[in-house]
Amino acid sequence: MYFAATQLDSCGFVVDFSSLRPLEQQLRAQFDHTFLVNADDPLLSEWQRLDALGALDLRVMDNVGMEASAQLVWTWANDLLLARDSGRSCCWSVEARENPRNAARFQCVPDWFGVEKASL
């Protein structure tokens, strides 16, 4: 994740990583030891049955690809930062990595961020 700010916070940080614990919890709940499946997966009912039995911890997503996952994390990070910092900071890039050879990056500056005052 890459962050930008229009000004540093009171401790001199763009983003204090310890303040991202709610995002960390959200990421763990979505991705840590879970089974991701597309909403249109033809075996979705079977995955749901196995989830109900406790055989897996199912997460249904519109798209489980790395591109969509990077965009999802970007959205979550910016939801948190906007609510907390009122537009002072943003996440402008996220790299999602499945393994060393499969990764994707979503990069976008949120519309609400004062990019003219920031250094990216």
Image: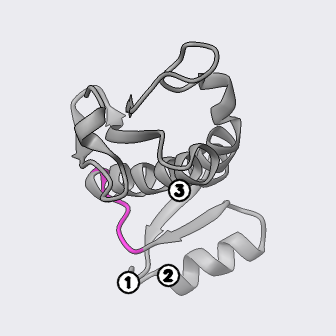
The residue pinned by badge 2 equals: 44
Residue 20, percent from left and from top: 63, 34
Question: Label 1: how many residues lie within 10 Å, few (<14), some (14-19) or many (20+)?
Answer: few
Q: Which residues are magenta?
A: 62-66
Q: Which mark is residue 79?
A: 3
Which residue is at a point 69% across and 35% down the rendered structure image? 21
Give the vertical position of 49 relative to 10 (above or below).
below
Residue 1 seen in this snapshot: no
The kind of residue on which mark 3 rests is Asp
Tell me which residue sits at (55%, 49%) in the image. Answer: 86
Q: Secondary structure at mark 3?
A: helix
Q: Is residue 76 visible?
A: yes
Quarter assignment of residue 53: bottom right
Residue found at x 39% / y 85%: 42
Residue 115 lies in what quarter of the image?
top left
**Residue 93 falls inside the magenta stretch:** no
Amino acid type of the residue that numbered disc 1 sits on in the rendered structure: Asp
Q: Position of residue 65 (x, y in %)?
A: 31, 57
Q: Tell me the CA gap for discs 1 and 2.
A: 7 Å
State how far apart marks 3 and 2 are (Cα): 29 Å
Query: Vertically, is 59 above or below 112?
Result: below
Residue sitting at the far top: 12
Near mark 3 (Cα within 10 A), the count class, few <14, some 14-19 or many ≥20, is some
